[in-house]
Image (cartoon, grey):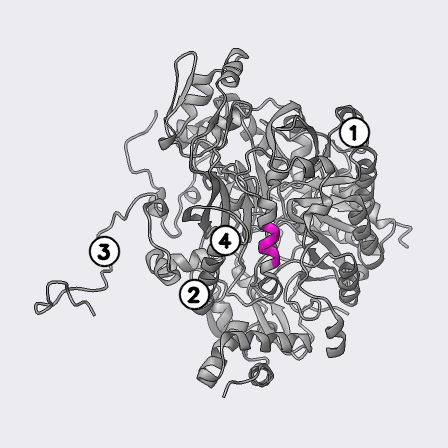
Amino acid sequence: MAKTPEEIADAMHKMVKDAFGVKKYKPMDLNKAMRELFGDEVDKKTCKEAIKLLVNSGRCVYTYFGGSFLEIPHREGAAND
Amino acid sequence: MAEAMQERRTDYGPPHYEQFLPPVVKENYGKWKYHEIVKPGVMVHVSESGAELYTVRAASGRLISIDKIRMYCDLADKYCDGYVRFTSRHNIEFLTPKKENVDPLIKDLKDMGHPVGGIGNAISAIVHTQGWVHCHSAATDASGVVKAVMDDLIEYFEERKLPGKLRIALACCLNMCGAVHCSDIAILGIHRRPPRIDHANLKKVCEIPNLSASCPTAAIRPAEVEGHPSVEVLEEQCMFCANCYTVCPAMPLADPLNDGVSIWVGGKVSNARHEPMFSKLAIPFLPNNPPRWPEVTEAVRNLVELWAKNAKKYERMGEWIERIGWPKFFKMSGIEFEKVHIDDFKHAGLTFKRSTHLTF
Amino acid sequence: MADKLPNTPKLDELEKGKWPSFVKEIKMAAKKSPMCADLLGQLEKSYTEKVGYWKHGGIVGVMGYGGGVIGRYSALPKEFPNVSHFHTMRVNQPAGWYYNTEALRKICDIWEKHGSGITNLHGSTGDLVLLGTRTEELEPIFDELQKINFDIGGSGSDVRTPSCCCGQSRCEWACYDTMAACHDFTMEYQDELHRPAFPYKFKFKFSGCPNDCVASIARSDMSLIGTWRDSIQQDDAEVKAYVDGGLDIEEDVISRCPGKCMAWDGKKLEIDNSFCRRCMHCINVMPKALRPGKDRGATILLGSKAPIVEGALLSSVLIPFIKMEAPYQELKDIIERIWDVWSEEGKNRERVGEFIQRVGMGNFLEAIEVEPVAEMVAHPRENPYIFYEEFFEEDDDEEGDKG
């Protein structure tokens, strides 16, 4: 059965959270991982919607270090008060 | 947060340009027939309908304050029915169908400290980047070098006495936010010292595999240093591109002793006559010497005047050099040809001289 | 407010001279903003020590968007506390960089209230750049920008803010409506512009003619450059008027023609349009006499970029000629296929031009379903190391069962 964007968002969020501090994922990395994990039950469009849910809710944020990544919100090293 | 997002408008894009077009532009959109350069910095476009549109182009420093923008607005309200536009080279343009507004507008602009010019066979404003005003990876300042160079070359902005167009651009590092690589004269900030690695903090702020992969010459390898998981740099393979620093802030390259400016010549983007060309290295290194970078301003002036004296009409810098050959260019400019002038990155062989077409 | 400016003898030197002074601009803004006073202080220190003092912030932004805000922090926050945060916001400019004073004044008011009061008009990609604010001001600024219908632009691995020349609004050479196309594409790709999903950035630049005033062939992943297929429109009386007026037509026009397709017999200019390379030179020199033809459209080129990472590239021809008419569907279908292939197979920080170099143009064209044509190359291959993908077996039938 086709996965909902909410279910995919949860799976993506877990992936990002588990890798926090070890590996940063680009949106396309997550998109590919979901298609690998759920096969026919998910398509690119649902993955895109899932990412939108994650960033609109603030569960994930985009970051940029020479390329764009999705991460758990945190205080970055360079930040000043 | 989630609730706030529901009321929020997103992805509505920029306002439609039509509301910002002066009436004369709207009425004659797509109907322009020809134009003439009336005098330095002033063009008139004539429509099929006979309507005329005068454009006055003035220099702007790119980095401008809100109070200056408000002064521009006052002028636009006074002379141009409240409309104004900007160009791809950071100039400001005032458009009006009223010929009688042109001279008073020019006077007001000059009184404000904004010279009028940059149209036709002239130097237009220097496309440039942020430099020390705002950038973390700058190898030189941008606004300061531009100010010094243009103060020196102002006559070529305000008058039309060059053989052709001359486009100068400045980028404060190899990232080239100003994409200077196809300019008649490119001023490019360069680093010359390999990164000083902050081993203690590297792992906290960067991902090591990403960092290794960022290096175009594969000079960065994972290594444990002083008990920290970190990287080592094969310094003889470092070409100071700062890719690693873009990916990882624990790899700073900036260094007052070794940072400076290089000068590249002969690029163009227009298809007129010769196809577009990259700029090529002329002067490998000049020091950062603020506030007026005298070595840079002198080098640029010399190049401009050498070209102006020797090029045929309409010949851009690169077209002129291609006609006379690079050995002649080095001879005439007095710039010493060195090992670093010979390319040694990918496809370098294509830049070697592969014929006996030489001048003596 | 900042009533006392720091001592800046080096910067003060740059208040002199005829070119507009950015130091004067920062000082003007410093009358209202303590941020700009500290900016002057930190910049003077850079001028003394010959090094910059900014740190990159990779995480700040507005909620829901992944582009449009560039994080900056001072490396010397104790010495210059008012530029401790100094983030940039890129505001998507209206196509062609036209404004009315009402809109500009509103932007100034927002920036006076929430930021440093200094700007770039414009940044290199084309955005109106608001330079220097604090993290907690980002949302209020976006909120106010929404009220006046200005959205923010791109940054990171996304569609960067498209830009265009003034096109048909003022220029007789524009071979298509660049401003309409730029606005249309910007609106079509809002999601791709605000939510980075690519291996790296992707830029569009729209130039109305081969003079390429927005440098699209050097500075955009997709360069859309106006051109024409039929003959140059020619007004013989006006040609003669230029010659009578002193134009050396042999030297300044005919000898500069890259197609060598022109001749002048003292009375009439003959152009063999089938060999015209659409370079614009003769038209540039005689705008009253010569104009681009009437069958107009654009050449689409792909792949230019600055040196980072694998070296600089110019765009190369993808579609020799296409009509540029809304809704531009044929072109948008190709763009979707390009993004699909590049997003799936591209490496982190690999621009589309570098991707094509790595996988080969032939393979790339196959993947995006575009037929190879001779206009795509400067010349055919010189090396005989050809990757033929199939060969005949002895027992194949005559048609060749290539499986």
Q: Secondary structure at mark 2?
A: helix
**Residue highlighted by disc 1:** B105
**Residue highlighted by disc 4:** C221
Do discs 1 and 4 belong to a common subunit?
A: no
Q: Secondary structure at mark 1?
A: helix
Q: Quadrant of residue B203?
A: bottom right
Do discs 2 and 1 belong to a common subunit?
A: no
Is residue C245 depicted above or below C133 in this figure? above
Do discs 4 and 2 belong to a common subunit?
A: yes
Residue C186 is covered by the magenta coloring: yes
Q: Chain of mark 3?
A: C
Q: Quadrant of residue B325?
A: top left
Residue type (three-letter) at the residue carrying disc 1? Leu
Give the residue drawn at x 78%, y 48%: C104
Which residue lies most toward the front here?
B49
What segment carries the magenta color? C182-187
Give the residue drawn at x 44%, y 55%: C353
| Residue A21 pos. (x, y %) | 59, 79
Q: Secondary structure at mark 4?
A: loop
Q: Are marks 3 and 2 in contact (CB under 8 Å)?
A: no
Front one among C57 and C349: C349
Q: Secondary structure at mark 3?
A: loop
**Residue highlighted by disc 3:** C385
Residue type (three-letter) at the residue carrying disc 3? Tyr
Residue type (three-letter) at the residue carrying disc 4? Asp
Q: Chain of mark 4?
A: C
- Residue C378 relative to residue C389: left or right: right
